Image (cartoon, grey):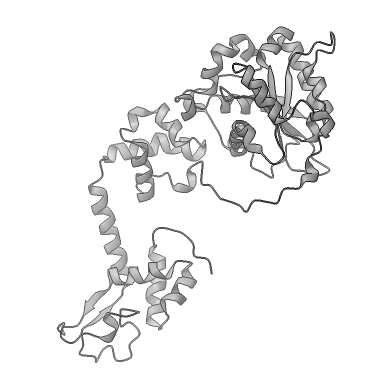
Amino acid sequence: MNAKKYKHLSFEDRCVIEEYLNHGYSFTQISNRLGKHRTAISKEVLKHRFLRGSAGPERPCCFESKPPYVCNYCDNFNHCKKQKYSYSSHIAYNEYKQTLISERAHLNITKDQIASINEIIAPLMIKKNHSVNQVFISHPELLPFSKTTFYKYIDLGILNVKNIDLQRKVKWKVKKEYDYHKDKVETSIKVGRFYTDFKDYMEFNPNSSIVEMDTVIGTQGSKGGKCFLTLLFRQYNFMLIYLLPYKKSRYVSEIFNQLKQLLGIDEFKRLFEVILTDNGTEFSDPESIEFDMNTGEKICSVFYCDPNCSWQKGSIEKNHEYIRYILPKGTSFASLTQNDCYLIASHINSTPRLSLNNHSPYEASLLFLGNDNINKFKIKKIDYDDIDLSYRLLRK
């Protein structure tokens, strides 16, 4: 049985340990019952067992130095004259609480600071899914210690914020074998647009603006179909989100036609000089993106990542995590509107990033994009404490 990796035993856990010891169960049986490692059970018993009787150390019980280390199950317990130990859930839990109080007494944090954090910081992290870095930026006056210390306080359980409330509790999954038949963009279309071509282009044009492009899907099925087209200005982590009725190339082309009209060709050329995307069929018409359909002028260059190499556009993949905080995988996009996309993008772009020296993508991109363009994209700056990266954002 796989052991659950909880750090502390509860009072109920200790009651189970005592009951099972009273009935002669082994540490392995107890660990299987509680979902804990047997070493944790043996350490618990050794740490909190207590001496019973008045016999001296010259007459130790045989269980003093071997499992179960206590005499709870012994039939001769009341008549035995040897030095013997017992385990009590109440005594063990009280000792644990006293140890915890003693440890907290040496922490460099006051009761008032704990109260302030629980009142102001905890709701931001629990209800609005703010990261540790984000709350350190928005409320430094309430956090006069390092992030490492903050994590320590969370581990010790002295704050209302728990580990489960933190944004990134990474679960590594077995990587699926790549299906090369999913690489639907024909090779003939990608000639001159391979990732090696992208690297060559950037070598000669190192200051070019790179926009990473991808899609995010909702619940798939006959009722669904809606998905997001995401565009990320790599240097600034500034992301645009557009709602597509279906994951098809013609709808991607429509969005770019709208952007060309919205920005004007000259500004579009400046902002979208290089576009890097994957091999999805929705991106199988690069010419409709690259060319001004009115004049036939090439105004940008589209390049494709290598198959099964999402890390080649890792910035946008990382930013998709923020979307998934708000719309977890399996969520239907059927009821969403483009205004919802603007709202989601505004909150994500207002979130400060460590990679941007604790500035938000909104702030970092302001000089490059300009206020006028940001307004055209319908992205608004959200105050730090009003940023909501949880499912509650779209339920207000």
Query: Which quarter of the rendering shows the N terminus?
Result: bottom right
Residue 135 appears in the figure: yes
| Foreground of the two, 65 or 377 | 65
x and y percentages locating residue 245 in the rendered image = 80, 31
Task: Indicate the quadrant where residue 63 lies.
Answer: bottom left
Residue found at x 49% / y 72%: 32
Can you say whether 139 is above or below 309 in the image? above
x and y percentages locating residue 238 in the rendered image = 59, 23
Can you say whether 117 is above or below 26 in the image? above
x and y percentages locating residue 10 in the rendered image = 39, 62
Residue 209 appears in the figure: no
Can you say whether 204 is above or below 219 in the image? above
Residue found at x 41% / y 35%: 121
Total numbered circles: 0
Task: Indicate the quadrant where residue 208 lies.
Answer: top right
Query: Which quarter of the rendering shows the C terminus?
Result: top right
| Foreground of the two, 121 or 59 | 59
Residue found at x 41% / y 66%: 12
x and y percentages locating residue 102 in the rendered image = 23, 53
Left or right, 341 with reference to 95: right
Left or right, 233 with reference to 118: right
Left or right, 382 with reference to 181: left
Residue found at x 40% / y 45%: 160
